[in-house]
Structure formats: C-alpha cells, structure tokens
Amino acid sequence: MSPATPLERFINEDRSLACVHCGLCLGSCPTYLETGNENDSPRGRIYLMRAVQEGRLPLGDTAVRHIDLCLGCRACEAACPSGVQYGDLLEHTRDFIEKNHPRSLFQTFLRRFAIEQIFPFPRRMKLALLPALWVKKWGLQWLMPKFARDALSLIPSDASEVVLPEISRATGVKYGSVGFVSGCVMSVMFGKTNASSVELLNRAGYDVRTPPDQGCCGALYAHSGNLEQARACARHNIEVFEHKAGLDAIIINAAGCGSTLKEYGHLLHDDPAWAERGKKFSAKVKDLTEFLTEGISNLKFELSNSGDRVTYHDACHLAHPQHITKPPRILVQSVAGGHFTELPESDVCCGSAGSYNLTEPEMAERLQKRKVENILKTGARLVVTTNPGCMLQIRAGLQKAGAGHIHVMHIADYLAES
Ligand code: SF4
Ligand code: SF4
C-alpha cells in the first residue's frame, strides 16, 4: 500500500469530521457573502474536501475551483464552535491539489514562478519591481491587459527599502532585547514601516536585533500548497534566531507572516528533530501591536490634533488565527482619541489574502470594492491596518473609486509619526 498522502493523514486524524455542518461559520465567510453558493462556504468546502478524499468526487476542475476561491482568511475558524481547524485542513488540501492536479500554463507560471521564486526573495523582487515602476512612471499602463494593469495598481510608487542595522539600541531605560522579522514584501516595499517598528520598540525600551540572514517566513509557500518549502523556511528561521541568545520575544509587524511564524510548531509537528524547536520559536513570536500593549514599556503617545476621522481595518491573519483585535484599536485610539471610528465589516477580507489578488483577481476585486464602500461610509480620512497586502489592496481600491485622498497607513508608521 502506498504511504498516506497529507490529505489522507488529515482525514484519518478525523479533524475534518469535527465539522458538524451547523452552518454558524457561513455568515463570516467573505466568498459565501459574495456568491451565496454553499460550495463557496467553509461547510461546503469541507464537504468537498472529504468527498474528494473518499473518492465520491474526482479531483477535477469543479472541486479545485471552489477550493481555489477560498481566501484562507480563516474567519470561519474563528466563528466555528466545534473547533474545526480549517486553516490546517486548507493548507493540506492545497498541498494535495498542487501535487495531483494539473494547472493551466498561466496559473503554473503565477504560482510556481512569480509567487514562489520572486516574492520570497527581496533581491529578485526589487529587480522585478523595476520595469513595473517605469511603466507606472511613464503612464504606460494603458498598453497592458486588464490583469497586468490591476497587478500594477497594487505596486506603491513610493516603495522604500531600508536595510535595518543588526542591532538597534533601546532609548531611555532598557527593559530587554527582542528579535525582529523584517519580512520579504515589508523589507522591499515598506522599509520605512520596518524602520518605524524598530524605532517604536527602541522607544519602548528594547534593543532590537534583526538578523540579516533570516529568510521568508514560509507563509507564501504554505498558502500556495507547498508545505515542504514552508517547512524549509521554518527550519532556517528557527536556526537563525536560536543563535541570538537572550531574546524576550520575536517581533513581526505583518499579520500574514505572524500567523505562520506562530504556527512553526504545528508546521513541523511530524518532524521529531524540529517539532520542539518550532514550538519554542513560535512561543516567542509576538505581533508588534500585541507586544506594545503588554508589559513594561517606556512608550507614550500624544493625542493627534489633526481632527481627521481615523478607522481601522482588521487584517484577517491578525484577527482570526491570532485573535488580535483589541491591541491595535487601543494603540490607534491612543492617538486618534474621539476621532476613531469603527469600520463596518472591519474583519471581512479586503481580497488581498497573500497572493490571492493575483491568482483570483475577480473575487479579489469584488471584496476590494466591498471594503472601499465600507470605508467611504465611515467618513474617515485615514485607514490604519497591520499587513502589507491589505495596505496595497485597499490603497488600489480607493484610487479606483476616486477616493485617493483617503490615506492607508501601517499602524507602526501611524504611531511613530504621532
Ligand atoms: S466548520 Fe464549524 S461552524 Fe462551520 S459548519 Fe462546520 S462545525 Fe459548523
Ligand atoms: S478561510 Fe475565509 S474564504 Fe475560506 S472558507 Fe473560511 S471564511 Fe471562507
């Protein structure tokens, strides 16, 4: 008998059987909210996964289509009273699909080349960005097909790379030392935000160590169905940070990466040599907002006197798998005061979802419009969030809607500028 595939192992462990088909997750699922199709809901997808595994449904275009359309936002997991580990089930299913289902040439190029060979490598991404920035600079977008124009609209004209020092010292009273994960997209497109994050940590009383040999967290691979590569990224980063003794925490300012970093123990669960090391690493990982709102800190913020209304968008991977919704609000409110206003459907995905806006542009655009409509209802002049993908997606959506005057900022920049 051939060894069990990851999907078989998953089903054998009965994790998907935890779903009792109650449907309580349906209202939280962005794709179900948009299509109303049960197959585009968490319950429907779990049913499809199980049907494929049990041989009642072939692994064909229909099943793959509904799984592809899933954002991996994990809102369903947070809503599920039965504790269904939907994110884990989805990652294993995607890994199974990529090994067993042929893709079109275009999708193969996107998934295996652009997403896996360029995005996780800052130098390659910098090179790939150059022609895109020229096209934008010279206003040549009109020469391109819609797909390419949409992808270009996501690239910020003010992309900034900042190489962080290996050690950045605490200012004022020192409380400890933390490691910093600089990220792939963050370090190339949002270098200034990384610098703001380190500045905040220094002001809070912490030395910040940013190992230059750290690599991609593995989220892009895990989400696109390449768990083996995601595990390789995890092993590399664990080793790199293990060499930095005495860290009180490992800080990340990108929600999507943070969620994966906190799950290294789980990702390496079946590897006896690494499972324990993975768990130890993950136990130290903290989102920047989580860290800045707990424990001792020198950090103080002044109320803004700009008078502009400010709102906050929950990045899926911060709100759902990490359950972090209060700390960023506390921080934003400490600067915006009474000018803070809640965003309707704040935790409904904006359509970015890692590389989803490239592989599923149509649904991504529907969710982008939905997010922009909700932002316009608030009257806010500023949207604060915690993930680079959300910033790019929401900025592009606001531009398309003629609302480019509404700014979108990472919370680290918002706080550092306060
Ligand atoms: S995933 Fe959870 S909430 Fe959704 S139908 Fe299954 S048991 Fe109910
Ligand atoms: S991960 Fe998000 S899009 Fe996918 S089924 Fe769950 S709620 Fe729906």
Image (spheres, rainbow, N blue to C red):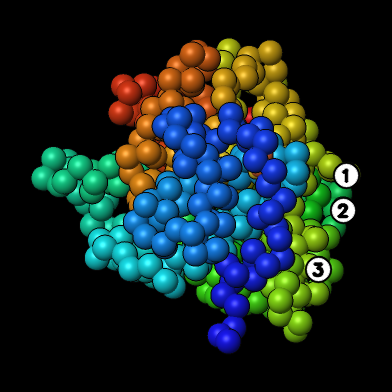
Residue 375 visible in the displayed image: yes
For label 2, the SS is loop
Q: Earlier in the sequence, mark 1 or mark 3?
A: 3
Q: Earlier in the sequence, mark 2 or mark 3?
A: 2
Residue type highlighted by circle 2: Tyr
For label 1, the SS is loop
Q: Report the residue marked by disc 3.
A: 280
Residue 169 visible in the displayed image: no
Q: Neighbour class for label 2 at 10 Å: few (<14), some, many (≥20)?
A: some
Q: Residue furthest left?
A: 143
Looking at the rendered image, the quarter that the C terminus falls into is top right
For label 3, the SS is helix
Q: Neighbour class for label 3 at 10 Å: few (<14), some, many (≥20)?
A: some
Q: Position of residue 134 (x, y in %)?
A: 22, 51
Q: Earlier in the sequence, mark 1 or mark 2?
A: 2
Task: Give the numbered dot on residue 175.
Answer: 2
Q: Report the residue marked by disc 1.
A: 295
Is the Cβ of the residue at disc 1 closer than 8 Å to that at disc 2?
yes
Q: Position of residue 348 (x, y in %)?
A: 55, 32
Which quadrant would residue 36 be assigned to in this image? top left
Q: Is mark 2 within 8 Å of ligand 2?
A: no
Residue at the image point whose x is 56% and y is 57% from the top:
50
Nearer to us in this view, 147 or 54: 54
Residue type highlighted by circle 1: Gly
Residue at the image point whose x is 75% and y is 62% from the top:
282
For marks 2 and 3, give the CA distance.
Answer: 21 Å
Task: Give the numbered dot on residue 72.
Answer: none
Mark 1 or 2: the one toward you: 1
For marks 1 and 3, give the CA distance.
Answer: 20 Å
Residue at the image point whose x is 55% and y is 49% from the top:
47
